[in-house]
Image (spheres, rainbow, N blue to C red):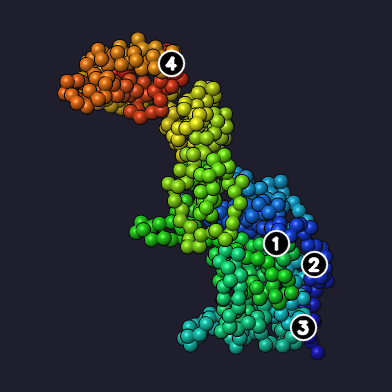
Amino acid sequence: MITSVDLANLIFPDISETISDLENKYPLRNLPLEAKVTRFAPSPTGFLHTGSLFTALIGYKLAKDSNGVFYFRLEDTDTKREVKGSDLELISQLATFNILPDEGMTLDGEKGDYGPYKQSERENIYKIVIKEMIKNNLAYPCFCSKEELDDLRKKQEEDNVVPGYYGIYAKCRNISPEEAYKRIKNGESYVIRFRSSGDHNKYIKVHDEIRGDLELSENDQDIVILKSDNLPTYHFAHVVDDHFMRTTLVTRGEEWLSSLPIHLELFDALHFKRVKYAHLPVIMKLDENGNKRKLSKRKDNEAAVSYFLKAGYPSEAFLTYLMSIANSNFEEYLIANKDKNYHDFKLSLKKMSLDGALFDIEKLKFFSKEYLAKLNKDDFTSLALAYAKEYDPKLLELINRDVNYFKSIINIERERVNPRKDYSCFGELYEGIKYFYHDEYLKLINESLIFNPNFSKELLINLLNEFKSLSFDKDEQTWFSALKEIAKKYNFCIDNKEYKLNPDKYLGNTANVAEILRIAVTSKSETPNLFAILNVIGEKEYLDRLNEVINILSK
Ligand code: GLU
């Protein structure tokens, strides 16, 4: 008589190891009780999604906060969806954010004793487990064709019953080992299914580290665990991997919550100790009509992390922003602890928001401005340089002309208690600073030079000629007093109270005169502190610029 053992030997003739061999090969980790072992387990299906970075950050942070282990596992068993090369891109983009796995796939290849960390290289491990499952009647080969499964689904729809491969609908679950043996010998193609003993009319208690205790319907589906291409499905592979890699906490997107009963049933059936699960909120955005929806890979630029890298948001600021989505008390923490950052903050799953975290670009800009403003000029410059090298050749060219000149530009009103918050990302830098460079400045004033139309060209030219005598090599006060003298001479009011009372007696006030000077030397009506700008460009350039503008006005 053919038994399930014979069947298992027929299907996996080369497998002689057992689950207990695997238990010995991958021993429990020698870590303190509170240390969490977490992982990031992406599929190589393209770019790093903002939601995936969020998931990676949470796993990383929980491991770091508890002196645990964070590892990277590549879930590449869905060969149809695989995008070649995206595995390395995922690893290197994570590295850009300084999320460096302790173990698993890293920039320097695989590290750690629990590998391989790429599912496609773990075939043998899955087969060992499945072989034992077949022997123990926990799994069986299923010969149903795609057409048969389609017909089944149609019939279930007509009968208004729960769709799927379960109970009486699971045609192959009752095939005898003998018949299965024959059909395999005859070369019929098959997949391997798990034999569920659940009942979807019953409930099981599950625990989610964010949501607490929940009741979900039991699984009763005989899910496929090994596909006809000999690769396992996610449901099965992650259970085996998280068990033998000795994960203690699975942090993954909430789209997996509904299949948790399948996963727990598999853990129980295999006598594996259940891992803990935390299902993280999906990142949403408000659509045109003000409704919340999931960030969409196809529709939303913000869905790809590369979008933010190209725009030049500093990675630390981006993670700070993601941390504020993760824990609502993080912002209060930052306000109360000015010199601390997200590395110091202790992330709590209990404080995770549940109703879909909303992506808010304005908030990201806020964190990013704060972060960039607090950098000293050298750190700012090295980040700007790294960005420019990768994404912004025009900016790179400006910086490379004279890095010290660049530093003096971006150091205006920096390195002090309330630094300026001009930039939310490095992508804004080129446009923001180009007027400091002579050739760029010339292009700007020749394209457009807009003074207040209330002032005649003659008046402007007279004022610009007067400005030539202003020296800015002493302090700002002295310079500004001299500017006021010029204002007074041309009947601009230098006393604001008086100007408010009698505006008609004057051509304007000191602010009008300062604006004329500002526009002339920078082409802009809004800039950082003008006195500081003049000191950066220096006297020769200052006089050149006044003459250029006088020339344009005189034409
Ligand atoms: N490969 C799965 C995904 O990319 C991972 C889910 C998990 O972390 O377990 O969604």
Residue 42 occupies which quadrant of the picture?
Answer: bottom right
Cα gap from disc 1 to disc 2, whole angstroms = 14 Å
Which amino acid does the dot numbered 1 rest on? Answer: Thr
Mark 2 and mark 4 residues within 8 Å of each other at the beta carbon? no
Residue at x 31%, y 27% (from the top left corner): 448
For the residues carrying marks 4 and 3, which lies nearer the camera in this image?
4
Q: Which residue is mark 2?
A: 23
Q: Quadrant of the N terminus?
A: bottom right
Q: CA distance from mark 4 to mark 3?
A: 92 Å
Looking at the rendered image, the quarter that the C terminus falls into is: top left
> Of circles 2 and 4, which is in front?
4
Compared with 447, 145 (above or below) is below
From mark 3 to mark 2, how far is it between C-alphas? 23 Å
Label 1 or label 4, whichever comes before in sequence order? 1
Asked which quadrant contains residue 450, the reply is top left
What residue is at 73 percent from the left and 74 percent from the top? 270
Q: Is residue 144 left or right of residue 494?
A: right
Pick the front one: 489 or 277: 489
Q: Tell me the number on the disc at residue 475.
A: 4
Residue 4: mark: 3
Q: Looking at the image, tell me whether mark 4 or mark 3 is earlier in sequence order.
A: 3
Q: Position of residue 284 (x, y in %)?
A: 46, 58
Residue tagged 1: 247
Give the structural element (helix, strand or loop) at label 3: helix
First along the sequence among labels 1 and 2: 2
Q: Are marks 1 and 3 in contact (CB under 8 Å)?
A: no
Q: Secondary structure at mark 1?
A: loop
Give x and y (percent) for residue 405: 51, 22
